[in-house]
Amino acid sequence: MMFVSIGIGAVLAIALISVVSALTGGKVTSGSTQIPSALQGKTIAHFSESGLYGGTEKAPWEDHHPSVLVFFASWCTVCQPEIPKVATYVSTHNLGGVVVLGIDANDTRSAAQAFVKKDRVKFPVAFDPNTTVTAGLFDFGTLPETVFLNAKGVVQSVHFGRIPIAQFAAGIQHLRA
């Protein structure tokens, strides 16, 4: 009887998560079908944010670069295995003019710096401790998120949650086309 209750609970939880994700602009996948984000096709305003190690990081499309924004935080358990893979991909592949900008959100500077150093992140990282960019411009409430934007700042696609490297590479390739 206990196993039946657990099974029913698991099915209900999965159904509820799928419905909430679909209603909040998240992605729900079934095979290769993906519900697009509400941000897709929208132009994102330029922004500038403090760099993780000082200076200022600005929206790459301000300088007409197609861009990938990778939102993460040191405390994010899903981000911990993802960011090293993204960092390795970015440092070992020719991105063809696509700029990758990390945005560390809702974090402390020291924790963010330690996380980035440990994972050998070489791309620039903006520090967004108050989620000005993360929640303000993109309305994200969870991490990680990956946003692909063309050179005019128009969102081409959004990936919610951990992104497979093959999908990350395909997103960059689409921006290069």
Image (cartoon, rainbow, N blue to C red):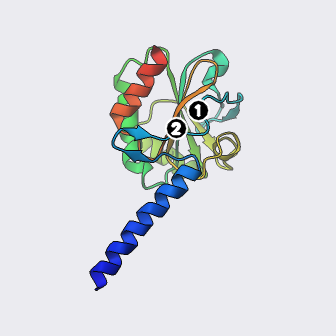
Residue type indicated by callout 2: Pro
Residue at which label 1 appears: 40
Q: Quadrant of residue 31?
A: top left
For the residue pair 9 and 95, the one nearer the viewer reads as 9
Q: At 34% from the left edge and 80% from the top edge, which residue is drawn? A: 5
Asked if one can make out residue 93 in the rendered structure from this viewpoint, the answer is: yes
Q: Quadrant of residue 152?
A: top right
Q: At 28% from the left edge and 86% from the top edge, which residue is drawn? A: 1
Examine the rendered structure and indicate whether residue 110 appears above or below residue 149.
below
The reply to whether callout 2 and callout 1 are in contact (CB within 8 Å) is yes
Examine the rendered structure and indicate whether residue 50 appears above or below residue 93.
below
For the residue pair 53 and 121, the one nearer the viewer reads as 121
Whole-percent x, y for residue 140 in the image: 61, 47
Image side of residue 99 versus residue 55, left or right: left
For the residue pair 13 and 174, the one nearer the viewer reads as 13
- How many neighbours does mark 1 have within 10 angstroms: few (below 14), some (14-19), or many (20 or more)? some
Residue at which label 2 appears: 36
Q: Quadrant of the C terminus?
A: top left
Examine the rendered structure and indicate whether residue 171 appears above or below residue 146.
above
Q: At 39% from the left edge and 35% from the top edge, which residue is drawn? A: 86
Q: At 41% from the left edge and 20% from the top edge, which residue is drawn? A: 173
Whole-percent x, y for residue 90 in the image: 40, 27
Residue type indicated by callout 1: Gln
Disc 2 from disc 1: Cα separation: 7 Å
Whole-percent x, y for residue 118 in the image: 40, 44
- How many neighbours does mark 2 have within 10 angstroms: few (below 14), some (14-19), or many (20 or more)? some
Element on which disc 1 rests: loop
